[in-house]
Amino acid sequence: MKARDFIKDKFIAILFVCILYGMILFLLKGFQVNPSLVIAITILYWGMMFALAGYEYYRKKSFYELLQTQLTELDQTYLLHTMLYLPNFYDGRVLYQALYEGNKAMKEQINIYRDSMEDFKEYVELWIHEIKIPLASGLLILHNHALPEGQKLAENFHKMDDYLEQILYYVRSENPEKDYFIKQLNLKNVVNKVAVKNKDSFIYRKIKLELEEVDEMVYSDSKWLEFIINQIVQNSIKYGKQEGAVIRITTSKNQGIVTLFIHDNGIGIEQSDINRVFEKGFTGQNGRKIAHSTGMGLYLCHRLCEKLGHHLAITSTLGEGTTIKITFPQNAYYDVLNR
């Protein structure tokens, strides 16, 4: 709060004080008061006025400067009320109370919205679990009865199941710590589950799957890690070659740090898109070629890897293929616990 701003705000009051002094001076001269007394009254009058103005300025200055500073520095400005103190002047108390009531009302609305979202999430999760039952039944029928185009139908059923999984994990990704359980697990078991899950796509598209040295122990959540690897494999299937497609999964271990590599010889990714593939909804050039691309798979993988303490990276050469690696630090278990 600058002095000139204070003076501008009090301009009417200052004008009134000056007019009042002029009237007092006119009366003193009219009554032929001793000039020494006039000087004394003038000094006393203006001394009191300046003292009152100074007191008014300095008691407001600290409050409004704190208000402006916190408003500029706070990332979450709705917390402004908690950073202020109750001032000792009326208009400041009115402002403080207004901020308090506004903050209180906002919290109430947030709680209503949060409860509504939680109800919606619970409904979505229930709906997904319910819709998976007829899907699983349909897949069982296809496997037990040789039908024309049966493999193609099975692959489409698996795609539907994968999209439902994607929705489910997207809903849960807001608070994944409520759903995951970190423990030591064998990567081979997780990778084998993903391979079995996609076997119909491998057969129908004649994709060769190569598993090399995946028998490594890491700390993660088996369910969430299976989803992440499955999304990456699904991308490799989706953007694979029409003939001679190969997906190779291998691991390396260096100073206790395990890295899982998932490599394909598919169409690859444009270099202009490579730095944006983990963005929500980003599809890039490949998304224009594949009509049903959502741009959510890698976004979810990246987000969940961060929550689990893993590191996800991607390299690609257009026309030659793509490699995605998931790094499991040795102390990942403790990193997740400390989040």
Image: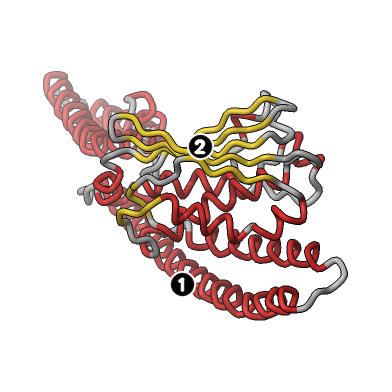
Disc 2 vs disc 1: Cβ atoms closer than 8 Å? Answer: no
Q: Can you tell which mark lies on residue 261? A: 2
Q: Can you tell which mark lies on residue 115? A: 1
Question: Given the image, on which type of amino acid does mark 2 rest?
Answer: Phe
Which is nearer the N-term, disc 2 or disc 1? Answer: 1
**Crowding near the residue tagged with mark 1, few <14, some 14–19, many ≥20 C-alpha atoms within 10 Å:** few
Question: Given the image, on which type of amino acid does mark 1 rest?
Answer: Asp
Whole-percent x, y for residue 174 in the image = 46, 57
Q: Residue at x 26, y 46 (%)?
A: 84
Whole-percent x, y for residue 35 in the image = 16, 19
User: Where 272 falls versus 24 (above or below)?
Assistant: above
Q: Residue at x 67, y 45 (%)?
A: 208
Whole-percent x, y for residue 126 in the image = 55, 78
Q: Residue at x 38, y 49 (%)?
A: 308
Position of residue 286 in the picture relative to residue 215 (left or right): right
User: Where 250 falls versus 128 (above or below)?
Assistant: above
User: Helix, strand, or loop for circle 2?
Assistant: strand
Q: Residue at x 36, y 52 (%)?
A: 220
For marks 2 and 1, give the CA distance: 41 Å
Position of residue 318 in the picture relative to residue 325 (left or right): right
